Amino acid sequence: MAINNGLPDPPAWHRRLASQAAKGLWRQPALRPAGFADFCSNDFLGLAHQAVVSPSSAGATGSRLVSGLHTELIELEAWAAKWLGAERVVYFPTGYQANLAVLQALATRHDVFLLDERIHASLRDAARLTLARTHFFNHNDEADLARWLAKPLPDGGQVYVVTEGVFSMAGTMAPLAGMAAICAQAGACLVIDEAHSVGLHGPAGSGLCIAQNVLPQVRILPLGKAAGTQGALVAGSAALGHLLENFARPLIYSTAPAPVLVSSALAQLQSLANADALRVRLSHQIEKASQIWPNALPGCIVPVAPRDPAAWPGLITAAHQARLWVRPIRYPTVPKGEECLRITLHAYQTDEELQRLEGWAKAFDIQPIPIATMRPC
C-alpha cells in the first residue's frame, strides 16, 4: 500500500531535472541486455561473476570501535597485509569511503594536498572536506610536482602528494618511482590510489606499487574492479592504521562491514591472487585490441571518440545493433565538450566480440583521444 504524506516535491528539484534534460545531459542506469559484449565495465578479469557462498552473519552490529569488529574482518586484513607486504591493512566498505576516510584522517589545517590534475572525483571530494589547502600539479609531471614541493610550508605542516597508479579515464600510468624519490627528498607523504592497477599488475596481482618496487606511505586499493567484489583496502604502517581508527570519521561513525561481505571479499581476493592465467589472457586481448587502435596506450582502458562530432547521435544505436555494450562518458564526469567512450577490455572477451568492436569503430572512424587534450572536470 502506497502512503501519500501530502508533501510535494520542492519545485527546484523539477527545475534542475528539466534543465538537465534540456541540455541533453539526462543520465540513468541501464541493464546490459543479454548477449551484448561488455566493453564498459571494470570487471577486467571476470571475477565478479563467480559465485561465492558464505555462512557468515549478515550484520556487524555496530561500528568497528564499539561492537563491529569480527573475526572475518581480522582474517581479511591479516591476509591482505601479507599479500600486499604491508604492516597493517584496514578494510572499508567502498573505495569512495576509503578515499574520504584517508584524506580526512591524515590532514590538519596546517597541511597541504598536492593532487594530480586528473585525480578521481572521490579524492577531490575528500580533499575539499578537509581544512588543508589543496593544489593540483600537471598530470604525471615530475618537474611540476618538484616545483610545488619547493614552496615553503607553515611550521609543522605536512605535504601529501596524491595520485593514481593507473588513471581511470585516460588509462595513463603514474611514474611512481620518480614521484617517490621526489617526495622522499622533500619530506612529503605519498598516497597512491590503485583502483585500476590492483589485480592487474605486480606479483599475484598485488598492484603497480609492488610491480615498480615503490612502497608509499599510503596505498588505497578499491576492490570493485579487477577483484570483482566490494570494498577497499588501505595499506601502510601500523601508525596509519591507528590514525584511521582514531581520526577517520567514515570509519568511526559507520557500522562496520558485514561479516558476509568481508568473507566474500576475502574469497575474491584469494581468487585474484591466483588469477595469473586470467592476467595473461587479458594481456593477449589488449594486444589484439592494439591492432584496432595502434596509437592507443597499451592497457585495459581506451578512451575514444568519433573523429567527426556529428557522428555521435548514431554511435550508440549502432553499437547496440552490433550487440556491443558501450556507454558514453559525459558531463559532469568529464568537462563539457569532451565527451568520450571509455572502452574497457576484459580477459573473457572473445575474438568475435573484438571483431565486432573493430567493425563498429571503423564504420564511425572512432579514434583514441590524445591524452594531452583530456582535462579534469
Image (cartoon, rainbow, N blue to C red):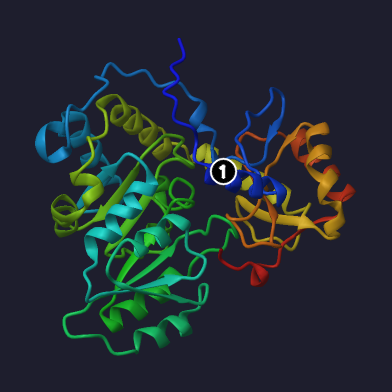
Total numbered labels placed on residues in the image: 1
Q: Quadrant of residue 58?
A: top left
Q: Give neighbour class at mark 1: few <14, some 14-19, many 20+ (Cα, 10 Å).
A: few
Rendered-image quadrant of the C terminus: bottom right
Amino acid under label 1? Val
- Residue found 49% across the figure and 31% down from its top: 48
- Residue found 41% across the figure and 53% down from its top: 207
Decide which of 317, 72 is in the foreground and name it: 317
- Residue found 40% across the figure and 21% down from its top: 52
Q: Is residue 121 visible?
A: yes
Residue 292: image location, x then y, percent: 78, 52
Q: Is residue 262 left or right of residue 63?
A: right
Q: Is residue 343 visible?
A: no
- Residue found 47% across the figure and 58% down from its top: 120
Q: Is residue 114 left or right of residue 305?
A: left
Q: Residue furthest front?
A: 6
Rendered-image quadrant of the N terminus: top left
Q: Is residue 17 left or right of residue 351?
A: left
Decide which of 9, 226 is in the foreground and name it: 9
User: Label 1 belongs to which residue?
Assistant: 280
Look at the picture and state if 37 lies above or below 167. Answer: above
Residue 60: image location, x then y, percent: 20, 28
Q: Name the element at disc 1.
A: helix
Decide which of 6, 91 is in the foreground and name it: 6
Look at the picture and state if 66 lies above or below 374. Answer: above
